[in-house]
């Protein structure tokens, strides 16, 4: 090493320079981090954030998009009977489907948890996940065919037992139930998988401790299983609520909104009004009605996930 | 091969927390230096600053005659062994060891030669094709060391490398590390919280606490001449006994340590002048358990009798630990396993006052 | 006396053990029975698809006998589709769109996830949250303004509009789960690589991607599923058969007015469902990992 006097000199001259270069070093890393994120940021900005604001602008124009009408489209929609039906059916469709999916998923997860782990469970899980794997638009076609008015496979079964034909998609309430049934068929496996994962993450010792404390099966469910799964249950339900509420494929293919617009949900109605009838502002306004509900659900999902991440971390 | 120096090195995290508060340290070429201290004392942060994994807030770090503050880790020519091994899980042992050389574009046969050489030193030649997950903890540790050796760097850095191993393996690997250092002689900085590891491995030990260096010295120096109560208590197992005391005058111009009415021990004549300034002051008396025994050494200067009430006995096999309470302060003594001592019975001990330490009550400075 | 009590206790314990065993056995068989019922219900539509696809148009329109059974199975429907140029176009379009979408999505999300998991910059926390929120935006919320935007770009009835838009559906979730996988890699691993002389890009390509391969596969499967099965965007933005993809092509091509060629439709559904089913069959564990990752990773 150099003698002390020259070393002090280097130190003195170096430190001023170094403060700058050290900062630059840190900056380089964060600049690179930002650059790596740039494609993502551009994608979200151009095709999510911009369209969201653009939708608000569009929803305030008249049909020919020549004049600004303020909240006129929203007021018009709310007064329209068809749209009132849309609000009702969307909520009915989403809430009923999600409740049924959650219940069936919970039961299925427990049944799966009962049988021995390993290949055996994997095969059952594999079979039960099939509805989720087939593209929804394609499997809904099959359902449509099974509900076919002239040659319904379900009606044939009913006839065998001596029942009359049911006009599956021809009568409002029955058609509504049919759309819900298809959604439940499609979405239950997702709930099952989520709940099964949650069940598996409950430590076995907790059940053993509860058993030694004298808990019955039902008590174990209410005092061990449900509290431990609470977070996953709420995340899954809220997430599914968003997806189901915004569903398009099932209603569009099965009924296209009919009969008498009784099965329309926000998405299919927006498609009919905005794309098919060419009233883009009205369609945009229709879509935006979903926003408050989706935003609420999204807020709680995010909170749940953040909590869960913290729980896992600790 | 190189020397490492820290000059007033400071590490301050966001929020103003100072992990390292301006340390000075010179490590000679070929030296094996161990940084030891309780968790949160700044030893790992210091090591990581030497490695270039943490930015240096203030001061300078020199490696081999160059300031490396702004040099990225890869250009510092160092190698590091991590606590959890940090082996690349998707690469074979060979590839793990060769990775650094491949990135530096070494020719293939040179890589092979170096890896084989390192594998020979560490006796892992038969493991070269395995993946890390197929290895035991000790084998992983060897591979991690191999990865450091093949690079032939200026400095080895070890960050608590033995903490994840079980007690038996830890002792074995400790010897192994020492052997490797004797073979390759690379300058080594080694961080641990285990003082036994520090004592057995180091040429010099650096004891750190609260972001500052408490004492630097050879293991013998630290054991026999600690400069602070912290070092005195940290080095040695079981830890040194500390008793609040007052320095009293004894007959014939001598001094004595007065702990309470029952326990008053004369200070050897050789130390009288050293402790004279503290006459009548409240001090802390320190004595190691191994200097509190049942051996009969009457007549030899400095060996003084003490009588204490036994609280608990812990037979260890080669020795038996006896625990006492003196005015609420715990005291430990090392007894011969053949001892006749029993709980709740007074026991006559011999204190080797030649090995005593006296500390200031507030500063903890050894006088 | 003590001996008899002990005996008594032992027999009692034995019977209890037996009853416990029996109870467990009942629970097990009950579970199997209930699961079987669910499996049958769940597999009815795919089964019916298969049956119909094997029937000739004549057999379907005869409307006699059980619709659940095939009297004269034939592969005519499949042969018709395989040689039908429009169907070939849809298939090729679907494959093209999906491959490009998956590739683009994976590049974007892996780069972003690496940055967000390790390289923190100003606002990176907010961006992570934003990514997750974007994942919760359903396609049906923004398809109308996007219709206008696609129009402005001159991409209405052009396959490339899908390639532009599908990544918005896949990237947020892929990024989110990749952040989770990357964050679970111990920090010491990149530090070791850094000391070994790797640059950030080398750490990503040589360490992170190989180590997080299960996550990459799960994310790829997700991106694939999304772009293969999407229905709303192609339905809204494409209208000529040379640009269509499978999901909309089948409906618009094989349903002509009131004429439903159900045998061909079902065969087409089967052929179109084949790639996801095959991927699922071989990579089920990754598929499931991707499914559950949304709530448990990150």
Image (cartoon, rainbow, N blue to C red):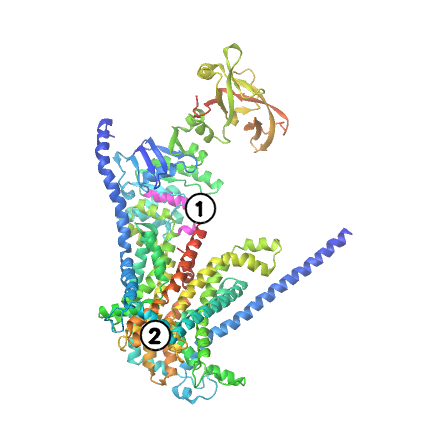
Rendered location of residue B326, percent (x, y): 56, 26
Q: What residue did someone put label 1 on?
A: B137
Q: Same chain for the residues at labels 1 and 2, yes or no?
A: no
| Rendering quarter of residue A142 | bottom left
Whether residue C177 appears in this view of the structure is yes
| Residue C266, x across and y down, in percent | 39, 79
| Residue B135 coordinates in the image, percent (x, y) | 43, 49
Q: Residue at x 47, y 15 (%)?
A: B272
**Residue B68 located within the stretch drawn in magenta:** no
Say which residue appears at 45% left-offset and 34% top-offset. B196
Magenta stretch: helix, strand or loop mostly: helix
In this view, the residue farthest toward the top is B252
- In the rendered view, tell whether residue C260 sits above or below residue C208: below
The magenta stretch is: B129-150
Q: Quadrant of residue B83?
A: top left
Q: Is residue A231 left or right of residue C86?
A: right
Pick the front one: C199 or A147: A147
Q: Chain of mark 2?
A: C
Residue C206 can be seen in this image: no
Residue at numbered disc 2: C247
- Whether residue B360 is situated above or below residue A301 in the rendered picture: above
Give the image location of residue C1, x and y in percent. Answer: 78, 52
Camera-side residue: B198 or C261? Answer: C261
Q: Is residue B131 magenta?
A: yes
Q: Is residue C113 left or right of residue B260?
A: left
**Badge 2, how many Cα within 10 Å: few under 14, some, many 20+?**
many
């Amino acid at each position: 090493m150099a003698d002390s006097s020259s070393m002090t000199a280097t130190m003195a001259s170096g430190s001023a320079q170094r403060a700058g270069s050290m900062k630059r070093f840190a900056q380089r890393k964060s600049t690179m981090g930002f650059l790596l994120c740039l494609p993502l940021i551009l994608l979200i900005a151009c095709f999510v954030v911009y369209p969201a604001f653009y939708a608000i602008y569009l929803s305030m124009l008249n049909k020919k998009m020549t004049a600004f009408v303020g909240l006129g489209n929203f007021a018009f929609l709310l007064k329209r009977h068809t749209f009132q039906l849309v609000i009702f059916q969307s909520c009915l469709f989403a809430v009923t489907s999600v409740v049924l999916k959650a219940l069936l998923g919970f039961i299925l997860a427990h049944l799966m948890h009962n049988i021995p782990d390993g290949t055996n469970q994997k095969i059952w899980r594999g079979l039960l996940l099939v509805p989720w794997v087939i593209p929804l638009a394609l499997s809904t076609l099959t359902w449509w065919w099974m509900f076919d008015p002239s040659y319904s496979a379900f009606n044939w079964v009913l006839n065998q037992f001596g029942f009359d034909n049911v006009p599956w998609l021809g009568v409002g309430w029955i058609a509504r139930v049919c759309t819900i049934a298809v959604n439940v068929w499609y979405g239950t496996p997702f709930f099952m998988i989520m709940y099964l994962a949650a069940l598996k993450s409950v430590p076995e010792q907790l059940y053993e401790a509860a058993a030694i404390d004298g808990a019955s099966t039902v008590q174990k469910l209410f005092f061990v299983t449900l509290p431990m799964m609470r977070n996953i249950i709420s995340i899954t339900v809220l997430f599914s609520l968003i997806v189901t509420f915004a569903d398009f494929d099932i209603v569009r293919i099965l009924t296209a909104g009919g009969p008498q617009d009784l099965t329309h949900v926000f998405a299919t109605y927006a498609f009919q009004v905005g794309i098919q009838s060419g009233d883009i502002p009205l369609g945009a306004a229709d879509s935006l009605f979903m926003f408050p509900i989706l935003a609420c659900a999204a807020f709680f999902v995010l909170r749940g996930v953040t909590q869960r991440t913290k729980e896992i971390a600790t | 091969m190189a020397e490492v120096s820290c000059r007033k090195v400071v590490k301050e995290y966001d929020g103003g927390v100072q992990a390292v508060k301006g340390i000075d340290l010179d490590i000679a070429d070929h030296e094996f230096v161990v940084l030891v201290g309780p968790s949160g004392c700044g030893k790992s942060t210091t090591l990581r600053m030497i490695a270039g994994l943490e930015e240096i807030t203030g001061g300078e770090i020199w490696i081999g005659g160059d300031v490396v503050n702004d040099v990225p880790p890869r250009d510092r020519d160092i190698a590091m062994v991590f606590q959890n091994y940090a082996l690349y899980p998707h690469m074979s042992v060979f590839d793990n060891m060769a990775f650094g050389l491949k990135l530096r574009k070494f020719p293939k046969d040179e890589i092979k030669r170096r890896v084989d050489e390192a594998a020979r030193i560490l006796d892992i030649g038969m493991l070269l094709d395995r993946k890390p997950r197929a290895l035991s903890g000790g084998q992983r540790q060897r591979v991690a060391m191999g990865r450091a050796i093949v690079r032939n760097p200026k400095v080895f850095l070890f960050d608590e490398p033995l903490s994840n191993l079980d007690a038996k393996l830890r002792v074995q690997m400790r010897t192994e590390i020492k052997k490797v250092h004797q073979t390759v002689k690379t300058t080594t900085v080694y961080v641990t919280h285990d003082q036994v590891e520090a004592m057995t491995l180091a040429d010099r030990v650096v004891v750190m606490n609260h972001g500052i260096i408490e004492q630097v010295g050879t293991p013998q120096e630290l054991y026999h001449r600690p400069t602070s109560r912290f070092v005195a208590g940290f080095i040695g197992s079981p830890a040194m006994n500390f008793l609040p005391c007052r320095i009293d005058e004894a007959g014939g111009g001598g001094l004595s340590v007065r702990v309470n009415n029952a326990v008053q021990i004369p200070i050897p004549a050789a130390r009288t002048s050293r402790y004279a300034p503290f006459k009548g002051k409240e001090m802390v008396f320190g004595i190691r358990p191994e200097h509190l025994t049942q051996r009969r050494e009457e007549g030899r200067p400095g060996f003084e009798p003490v009588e204490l009430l036994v609280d608990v006995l812990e037979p260890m096999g080669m020795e038996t630990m006896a625990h006492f309470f003196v005015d609420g302060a715990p005291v430990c003594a090392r007894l011969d396993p053949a001892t006749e001592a029993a709980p709740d019975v007074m026991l006559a001990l011999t204190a080797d006052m030649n090995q005593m330490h006296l500390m200031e009550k507030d500063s903890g400075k050894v006088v | 006396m003590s001996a008899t009590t002990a005996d008594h206790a032992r027999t009692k314990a034995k019977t209890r053990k037996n009853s416990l065993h029996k109870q467990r056995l009942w629970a097990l068989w009950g579970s199997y029975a209930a699961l079987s019922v669910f499996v049958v219900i769940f597999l009815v539509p795919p089964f019916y698809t298969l049956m119909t696809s094997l029937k000739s148009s004549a057999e379907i329109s005869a409307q006699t006998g059980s619709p659940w059974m095939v009297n004269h199975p034939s592969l005519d429907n499949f042969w018709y589709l395989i040689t039908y140029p429009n169907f070939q176009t849809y298939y090729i379009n679907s494959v093209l769109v999906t491959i490009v979408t998956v590739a683009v999505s994976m590049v974007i999300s892996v780069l972003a996830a690496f940055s967000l998991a390790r390289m923190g910059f100003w606002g990176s926390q907010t961006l992570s949250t934003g990514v997750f929120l974007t994942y919760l935006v359903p396609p049906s919320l923004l398809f109308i303004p996007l219709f206008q935007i696609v129009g402005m770009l001159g991409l209405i009835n052009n396959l490339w509009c899908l390639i532009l838009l599908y990544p918005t559906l896949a990237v947020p979730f892929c990024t989110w789960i990749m952040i989770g996988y990357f964050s679970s890699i111990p920090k010491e691993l990149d530090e070791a690589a850094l000391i070994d002389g790797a640059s950030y890009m080398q750490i990503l390509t040589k360490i992170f991607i190989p180590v997080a391969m299960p996550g990459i596969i799960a994310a790829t499967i997700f991106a694939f599923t999304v772009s293969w099965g999407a229905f709303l965007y192609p339905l809204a933005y494409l209208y000529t058969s040379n640009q269509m993809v499978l999901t909309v092509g089948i409906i618009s091509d094989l349903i002509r007015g009131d004429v439903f060629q159900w045998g061909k439709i079902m065969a087409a559904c089967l052929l179109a469902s084949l790639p996801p089913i095959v991927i699922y069959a071989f990579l089920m564990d990754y598929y499931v990992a991707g499914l559950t990752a949304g709530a448990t990773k990150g």
